[in-house]
Amino acid sequence: MIFLKNDYSLGAHPQVFQALADQNLTPSDSYSNDTFCTETTQLVRQITGQPDADVHFIAGGTLTNLVCLAAFMRPYEAVIAAESSHIYTHETGAIEATGHKVLPVPTTDGKVSPEDVDKVVAFHDMEQMVLPRVVYISDTTEMGAVYTLDELKALRACCDRHGLYLYIDGARLAMALGSSYNDVTLKDMAALADAFYFGGTKCGALFGEMVVIVNDTLKPHFRAIMRQNGALFAKGMLLGIQFQALLKDDLYTKLGRQADAMGQKLAHGIGAKGYEFAYTPVSNMIFPVMTREKAAELAQNVMFEKWLDNADGTQTIRFVTSWATTEDDIDGLLALL
Amino acid sequence: MIFLKNDYSLGAHPQVFQALADQNLTPSDSYSNDTFCTETTQLVRQITGQPDADVHFIAGGTLTNLVCLAAFMRPYEAVIAAESSHIYTHETGAIEATGHKVLPVPTTDGKVSPEDVDKVVAFHDMEQMVLPRVVYISDTTEMGAVYTLDELKALRACCDRHGLYLYIDGARLAMALGSSYNDVTLKDMAALADAFYFGGTKCGALFGEMVVIVNDTLKPHFRAIMRQNGALFAKGMLLGIQFQALLKDDLYTKLGRQADAMGQKLAHGIGAKGYEFAYTPVSNMIFPVMTREKAAELAQNVMFEKWLDNADGTQTIRFVTSWATTEDDIDGLLALL
Amino acid sequence: MIFLKNDYSLGAHPQVFQALADQNLTPSDSYSNDTFCTETTQLVRQITGQPDADVHFIAGGTLTNLVCLAAFMRPYEAVIAAESSHIYTHETGAIEATGHKVLPVPTTDGKVSPEDVDKVVAFHDMEQMVLPRVVYISDTTEMGAVYTLDELKALRACCDRHGLYLYIDGARLAMALGSSYNDVTLKDMAALADAFYFGGTKCGALFGEMVVIVNDTLKPHFRAIMRQNGALFAKGMLLGIQFQALLKDDLYTKLGRQADAMGQKLAHGIGAKGYEFAYTPVSNMIFPVMTREKAAELAQNVMFEKWLDNADGTQTIRFVTSWATTEDDIDGLLALL
Amino acid sequence: MIFLKNDYSLGAHPQVFQALADQNLTPSDSYSNDTFCTETTQLVRQITGQPDADVHFIAGGTLTNLVCLAAFMRPYEAVIAAESSHIYTHETGAIEATGHKVLPVPTTDGKVSPEDVDKVVAFHDMEQMVLPRVVYISDTTEMGAVYTLDELKALRACCDRHGLYLYIDGARLAMALGSSYNDVTLKDMAALADAFYFGGTKCGALFGEMVVIVNDTLKPHFRAIMRQNGALFAKGMLLGIQFQALLKDDLYTKLGRQADAMGQKLAHGIGAKGYEFAYTPVSNMIFPVMTREKAAELAQNVMFEKWLDNADGTQTIRFVTSWATTEDDIDGLLALL
């Protein structure tokens, strides 16, 4: 069975796992007050060019999103997000459960544009409406798209125009940074976002995400919101150790690049066989369109996800590669098409 | 100045006000445990043909909606509503503030169809998604449309198919019942809805709404949810007195019919002058389309609301009549067109 | 039957009711954007000596408390209140339902002291704990006690020391102002509190409360929080009209004084017959202690509330007088003791 | 430096770590749909004697408590807990943030008695109050106390009498099971509790807790509540693997016994030197009382927590042993006393 269902089916990249093994019996302070978290924070400040950034460590992505959005908004404020975004559809109403409305914008590939934001802001011009306060984007998006530097700059300008915060969900940040379509550096991202997070779970860590808060306004009492939501991890050192290993020699981007390279190899192979794609393949998530019969046939030897039943009777399916995907996996799949 | 801005700019209909005056110094039990609320409850059970219905009294419409939806859903459940519905756009995220997602469906005139509901339910087929549990409709809708008996029956069947509750916002129930396009009786409504409310604020009362809960499952502990949300009114007798007056000799429907009659007179007059309507005028809210210049000119003598800037440069505006609107008001307005 | 059960069993004081009657058919702007609310706001600013105060109108007391506390606190913050306070025991967890912890302090008569506050603040010295942010007091308290000017000044100083807001629940503010034990003026109160409210429901209004926000920090977006909680009253003019009538010629304090006078007459009479009081009687709520047999006998002719079963087998009961209580009521009760 | 500050300063017990290492590159299904979680669930059902129990895996203790309590209660319901309990004081209002009141009962050693529960239930006899629904206890308690079988049976009977659920926080369940004062088996616990959790974080796991839901009423849609609160762990297999290792050959209880044995050795040694204890030492948390000077002196060589400044000028301090504490640690500390 070839596994291309998702990018979180394994434990940690061996270097990350080894780092955990090395420190397994080192007594450390709790709640990220340990030396690993402290050193990692310093490292993050350096590589993002933000010497005053706050860095926080959280065990999972939904938890990270809900904590950040709960922390960044007052009760009557709302977050703008793609209709296809994780927070709008796939977190069982986690953001609404914190009391906030998510304002969806339709998109083709999950990328939110300044025009989308403008429209939502223009619509919410009455006291009876919620007040848009945060623009949530994911990079890569849920369809594997990658923001360009120009796009991020335009979103930043748009946010400034309307007094909005820009928050970037980096569950697959490694794959964004590693994409050959990417021209955004970590320094760019940190300069343009008010806050963003480095996904670990899908990018080589055993588990965990790392939030970077750049905007001073968003920093106070963030740990209180974390704790209140069960997100202040007792053994924070485990997260500090992992991200330290991931940032060492830029392993993080390398793993993203590796995942993307496999994705691109897969995309080229599939394209060469004449299949079309629902979204342009630029990272590690590939969405070919095929007949239901072909998809059903594939499912006997490959694990993947059905994405959409199309109106014309075809199906869009999703293949996801990761740092652990091998050339053999790809060749094996291509041989079946 | 002719006032056609909304239907809640006055106090109470004189008969309702007199009822309050008559009982102003009658000591009564608190929190709707008084004889007026008890008698009104009996009356409601009789006219709706629901001898076991629970009846509750709440001071305002948004409060009623948030209490009902908070009471009817578990945390991971969501309510389906028209994109134009009050709860989705004009209550400052009140439903989300209780922790629940509102799932919007696009409509032309605010009416939700079984097909709309089917689509939402079909989409929410994964554990990562919220679970649709309530269908919220308003009758009349925010565009003044009225549900037919066949439409309500089809929605009921749809809700039964999916295990959903049907909750009807009757902020303008009097105008629905009073419309010449209406073929739904109170008994029909009570038989088809799991819960609904009689709007008082816009229908002749000084203030207040009256909830009728038909489905036994939704009854327990409703008062606790009311109180927790500040909706258990200390002087509940004030609400009991008012609805008793409104239900006497069916004053409620008469006031709706009166408001609608003025609306229809207005619509015919406007139509006769060659204006088009954004939505078919069937109740007390009329949405003609005119040039911005014409609308601006009118605004010098008439109070109304701008509804929409249309793509072709015209404007849709909203006129609202009420039980207190006079023939003179209508004639005066028509003379200006 | 003599009614001494509570102070919200009637409609409005005749002067207030007449004011409503006078304006019943005057078209007014909605959501407190009308001239009555505007004029009343000006009046409140004048009599409180706070030309920049924000004034808001809400339909009930629990709703007022939950809106204020939700507006004044961030999610991880908590409110300090007497264990016997309305918000801690009798609002079905309304404050907790907005996400905030209520930190109870034991008191004898419902009055919170600076020492109580100091202790709570000292205890909450760890990151794992909520952050106390508001001190909630009620004046009169739930046991009918009244704060002195010195006590309020000391609480203010204590709040300043700890960075806390002082919020005063004035459900029975008229009775506090009208008490012969009171030496606090409205100007004092407004100078010492960050926010407080004039209770209407128990003090001569048909219904409604009026919030005064003095501290600039607490003003922005208060209406959004109101609306989100269903507390932005559509016909706000009804509340503006009532409070205008109550403030005219200081009717508000006069009604409180009248209620208190009846309370004092009752207390003196009861005391003269040798009964003891659970709390010193200084306003309109009187808590005599008697045998269960005596209480049961009284209950045949007087409506009152049982307050507490005492350890020695006696009962504390509660009599409440209001602006509508007559000398005959009191004489009638005393004759039964 | 001797480390006796807490029991969560290390990674995992070597056998647990090895299990993770063994499966690090085994592709597994996500969200606890993997074979490790499935097998562990079967194992738990067997050792608890509850073939129909639901088993869930969550990354941390506060998250577990808030998810369970949010899932088990309706909005107007409340949980009874010791005033010293983790949920009442040390989770930054996490339970209240889900909308629920925590009803505190004073205790000496953190153990809640049926009489405590009876009192709280008796007090909450009015509609204006929250409805107690869950009794939360922790075993061991925050003061290291252990419930006896008779005590748990009496609590169960009390809960049945009042229609309450019994939920046991087992953050230190291993130390409860391992205590020489314990006479409760896992089968007893599962038969008496409606739900409880096996703590992993403090009991040999790298991280994670495992919830066992016995009462059928509490089972439906629990995963939806988990996900909504960010508690449905993407790589659930990590938790399944760890608990499988912990349950193998009863390693879990053995590690608790080991921690307790070190605690008892410490307690005997301290007692022999004439110190008193604030709470009877029966598990792995030991609370001796000493002069501030002595405590300050100790702090130069030992890491521990200050627990309380006593009225007589002495201090209560807290030593915590774990599965990793050595005899040398204990001897070293005792030599300093």
Image: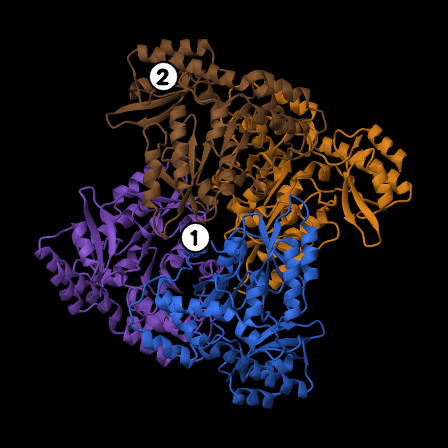
Chain colours: A purple, B brown, C orange, D blue
**Subunit of label 2:** B
Closest to the observer, C251 or B318: B318
Which disc is residue C35 wearing?
A: none
Quarter where residue A28 is shown: bottom left
Q: Quadrant of the C terminus of chain C?
A: top right
x, y percent for residue D269? 63, 87
Mark 2 vs mark 1: tell me if same chain.
no
Above or below: residue D231 compared with residue C109: below
Question: Closer to us: mark 2 or mark 1?
Answer: 1
Residue C244 in view (yes/no): no
Residue at 31% in and 17% down: B294
Element on which disc 2 rests: helix
Observer-nearest of C303 and C319: C303
Amino acid of disc 2: Leu
The residue positioned farthest toward the right in the image shown: C273
What kind of residue is marked 1?
Ala
Residue with the mark numbered 1: A70
Circle 2 residue: B298
Residue A35 x %, y %: 41, 75
Q: Tell me where residue D94 appears, x and y as whole percent.
A: 52, 57
Q: Is residue D200 visible to the viewer in this orientation of the structure?
A: yes
Q: Seen in the image, is D180 located left or right of residue D32?
A: right
> Residue A214 sits in which quadrant?
bottom left
**Residue lying at 51% horizontally and 38% vertically, measured from the top left:** B68
Q: Secondary structure at mark 1?
A: helix
Q: Nearer the viewer, residue C144 or B90?
A: B90
- Seen in the picture, residue C97 relative to C321 is either above or below; the reply is below
From the top left corner, tell me how far across and down residue A243 is, in percent: 33, 70
Instruction: Check the image and report above or below for D226 versus B68.
Output: below
Q: Mark 2 to mark 1: distance in Å? A: 45 Å
